[in-house]
Image (spheres, helix red, strand yellow):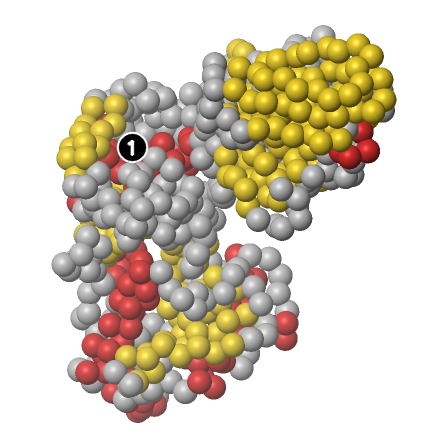
């Protein structure tokens, strides 16, 4: 018996002595087995034969394969090409392995590649634990992998998948050289900090004030004390077409985090030092217990013990890595899976979900990953702030909770009412839709939804704990949500989200064929709607030319604008924005195409205009002979002459761009030659119209006063 044990020990030692390259075939078996185990333990049910790899990507270092990446339709898995390294580097349940890796993700993966290169260069063998992992996931008995009695996990804590570019950098310094919509990047340090703060929904406001000078952007500053963070407007992710409220709320938080850590903003990337994060949290953001902890000098097991302990407590961590001489990279670690033999940790890289997945924290053979965390990133004052009484929500899009935070249950014997009232004097809200993102409520506690300002309005829905939920839509611009609890028990609570439907003042394409008329953005005495895209065609018959004359004009900024085209030639005649009434615009073809666009940021009263046409209704020579104006353009006076052979009641008038009659002469029963001189010396410079009106027809000519 002793001889047999000795032989087994020698065999085991022999395996440890001969590290080897991993073939693509062996790597695929490991990838398939590992993914099968992890998915079924932590993410649902998956048949082994349903795992289909769609692509194999090889990551090289110095001409040698370092990593195998197996892409799937939804997800990917990364396997080491060196068996002295832990078998699986990382995986994801969704997306695919980024083909064009952003700098922070590129660095993160390169850390593992560097470790593998170190193992190869130094001919380091696999240790016993790593060897066992390779043996475990190289089995043909894949069903045995599900017999993991010690398996446990902490599901992903942070729901935000925020980014550093537009529109998250809305408040970052402007820089025309930046590809991020002309603003510098928000910075990975600020993005990681802000996503963790979003998880806590804390604090209401910061403390203190900070400013510093950065060339070429000037003085950058933040008043933390007076800035109240609009948590109710923030969403898990936003894009260019998202609500202005949500975009500005998130961007403000990210910018304040940036100022707190003395962010060095730039058009190609913005950086700050991770060791400065705890002090910034303590001095400005009311997180007083945060500690910077580097991995250097720690064993893998000791490092994992810290990560697991924080995550078991429900504390996501700021995670960073250094890449001298640069600032480094920062992201969030916010969950883990443990199969009974190895941990993988969930990383949120702060690039809109790009690359997010589970990754090993293991380094091998004496190589040390350049990793660090900020631990105890937790609220330190009175927390949580349970919802009670009446709370008014004025954002057009937002979310709200019972106020218990991510760790506690809501309180018993409580009533909290949420009045969703986004209507303002300048907006027009048609209805509100309520969605249930999370609903974990005791069976005796209830949420009631009312179609109006108070509970005397019709009740739209009633949801007790344990019941199924569905979206609810109001018929008007207010909705009341009431949450009532008794003393028989409580639970984790709810996360509700809502969107207000803003009236669409104009849309599609409207065509006008009348010789004169008016048009506008449709908003009347309100502001125009965000995200407008409206088109107008003006195509009167027999028009020699067409002039658009503005009566009012006010847009919020250059991102809300009118484009005016000559429909006959397709030439762009004008692109207009601002708050001054533009000069009249003339389409020589007599036809005009107008496009009105507004973005999601800031609105204004909008615009209104009318149009006039030349030679409309009847050809000039059929109504009046020898119709002449001279000189034209005119400075002081202009002479008008025409001939009519039939006695007519006539009106001769000059019309201003705004439609005002600057000159009018009514002539009864006129026949013969008409000649008159009109003083235009006091007319403002611009385009005017001379109109001749009779029972037989009308004629018009354009006058230019210089």
Identify the image quadrant of residue 564: top right
Name above or below for residue 517 compared with residue 239.
above
Horizontal side of 91 relative to 115 (left or right) equals: right
Residue 611, percent from left and from top: 66, 28
Q: Is residue 512 visible?
A: no
Place of residue 416 in the rendered image (x, y in percent of width and height, measured from the top left) = 56, 15
Rendering coords of residue 454 (x, y %): 66, 10
Q: Which residue is mark 1?
A: 256
Q: Residue at x 32, y 29 (%)?
A: 379
Q: Residue furthest top?
A: 456
Of residues 482 and 618, the one drawn nearer to the viewer in this rendering: 618
Q: Nearer the viewer, residue 506 or 553?
A: 553
Q: Which residue corresponds to the image point at 40% horizontal and 79% vertical from the top-left? A: 58
Q: Nearer the viewer, residue 519 or 137?
A: 519
Q: Nearer the viewer, residue 661 or 81?
A: 661
The picture quadrant where one finds residue 520 is top right
**Relative to residue 582, is residue 268 drawn left or right?**
left
> Dividing the image into 4 quarters, which one contains the N terminus?
bottom left
Q: How many marks?
A: 1
> How many neighbours does mark 1 have within 10 angstroms: few (below 14), some (14-19), or many (20 or more)?
many
For the question of whether residue 178 can be seen, the reply is yes
Q: x, y (%) of residue 82?
A: 32, 81
């Amino acid at each position: 018996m002793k001889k047999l044990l000795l032989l087994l020990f020698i065999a085991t030692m022999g395996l440890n002595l001969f590290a080897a390259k991993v073939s693509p075939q062996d790597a695929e078996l490991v990838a398939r087995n590992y993914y099968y185990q992890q998915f079924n333990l932590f993410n649902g049910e998956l048949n082994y034969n349903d795992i289909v790899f769609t692509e194999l990507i090889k990551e090289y270092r110095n001409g040698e394969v370092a990593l195998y990446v197996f892409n799937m339709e939804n997800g990917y898995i990364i396997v080491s090409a060196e068996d002295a390294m832990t078998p699986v580097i990382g995986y994801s349940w969704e997306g695919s392995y980024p083909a064009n890796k952003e700098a922070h993700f590129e660095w993160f993966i390169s850390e593992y590649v560097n470790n593998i290169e170190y193992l190869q260069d130094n001919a380091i063998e696999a240790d016993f634990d790593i060897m066992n992992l390779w043996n475990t996931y190289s089995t043909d008995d894949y069903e045995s992998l599900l017999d993991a009695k010690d398996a446990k996990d902490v599901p992903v804590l942070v729901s935000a998948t925020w980014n550093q570019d537009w529109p998250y950098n809305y408040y970052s310094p402007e820089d025309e050289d930046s590809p991020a919509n002309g603003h510098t990047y928000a910075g990975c340090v600020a993005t990681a900090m802000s996503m963790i703060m979003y998880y806590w929904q804390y604090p209401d406001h910061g403390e203190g004030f900070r400013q510093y000078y950065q060339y070429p952007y000037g003085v950058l500053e933040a008043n933390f004390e007076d800035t109240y963070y609009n948590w109710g407007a923030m969403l898990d992710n936003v894009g260019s077409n998202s609500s202005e409220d949500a975009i500005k709320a998130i961007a403000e938080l990210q910018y304040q985090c940036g100022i707190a850590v003395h962010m060095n903003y730039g058009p190609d990337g913005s950086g700050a030092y991770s060791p400065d994060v705890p002090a910034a949290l303590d001095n400005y953001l009311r997180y007083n217990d945060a500690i910077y902890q580097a991995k250097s000098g720690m064993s893998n097991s000791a490092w994992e013990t810290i990560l697991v302990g924080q995550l078991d407590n429900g504390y996501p961590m700021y995670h960073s890595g250094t890449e001298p001489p640069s600032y480094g990279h920062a992201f969030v670690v916010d969950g883990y899976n443990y199969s009974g033999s190895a941990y993988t940790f969930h990383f949120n890289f702060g690039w809109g979900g790009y690359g997010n997945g589970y990754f090993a924290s293991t380094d091998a053979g004496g190589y040390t990953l350049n990793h660090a965390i900020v631990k105890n990133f937790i609220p330190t004052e009175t927390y949580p702030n349970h919802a009670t009484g009446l709370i008014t929500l004025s954002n057009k899009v937002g979310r709200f909770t019972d106020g218990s935070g991510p760790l506690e249950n809501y309180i018993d014997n409580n009533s909290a009412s949420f009045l969703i009232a986004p209507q303002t004097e300048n907006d027009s809200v048609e209805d509100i839709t309520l969605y249930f993102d999370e609903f974990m409520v005791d069976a005796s506690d209830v949420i009631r939804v009312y179609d109006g300002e108070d509970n005397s309005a019709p009740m739209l829905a009633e949801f007790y704990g344990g019941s199924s939920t569905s979206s609810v839509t109001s018929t008007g611009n207010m909705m009341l949500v009431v949450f009532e609890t008794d003393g028989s028990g409580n639970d984790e609570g709810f996360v509700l989200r809502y969107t207000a439907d803003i009236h669409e003042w104009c849309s599609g394409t409207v065509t006008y064929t009348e010789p004169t008329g008016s048009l506008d953005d449709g908003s009347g005495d309100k502001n125009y709607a965000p995200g407008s895209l409206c088109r107008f065609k003006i195509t009167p018959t027999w028009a020699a030319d067409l002039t658009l004359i503005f009566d009012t004009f006010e847009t919020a900024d250059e991102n809300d604008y009118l484009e005016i085209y000559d429909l006959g030639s397709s030439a762009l005649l004008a692109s207009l924005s601002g708050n001054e009434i533009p000069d009249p615009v003339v389409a020589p073809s007599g036809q005009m195409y107008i496009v009105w666009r507004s973005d999601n940021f800031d609105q204004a009263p909008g615009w209104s205009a009318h149009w006039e046409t030349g030679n409309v209704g009847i050809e000039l020579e059929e109504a009046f002979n020898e119709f002449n104006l001279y000189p034209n353009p005119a400075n002081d006076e202009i002479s008008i002459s025409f001939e009519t052979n039939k006695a007519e009641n006539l009106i001769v008038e000059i019309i201003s761009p705004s439609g005002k009659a600057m000159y009018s002469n009514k002539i009864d029963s006129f026949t013969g030659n008409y000649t008159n001189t009109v003083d235009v010396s006091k007319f403002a410079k611009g385009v005017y119209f001379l109109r001749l009106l009779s029972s037989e027809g009308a004629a018009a000519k354009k006058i230019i006063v210089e």
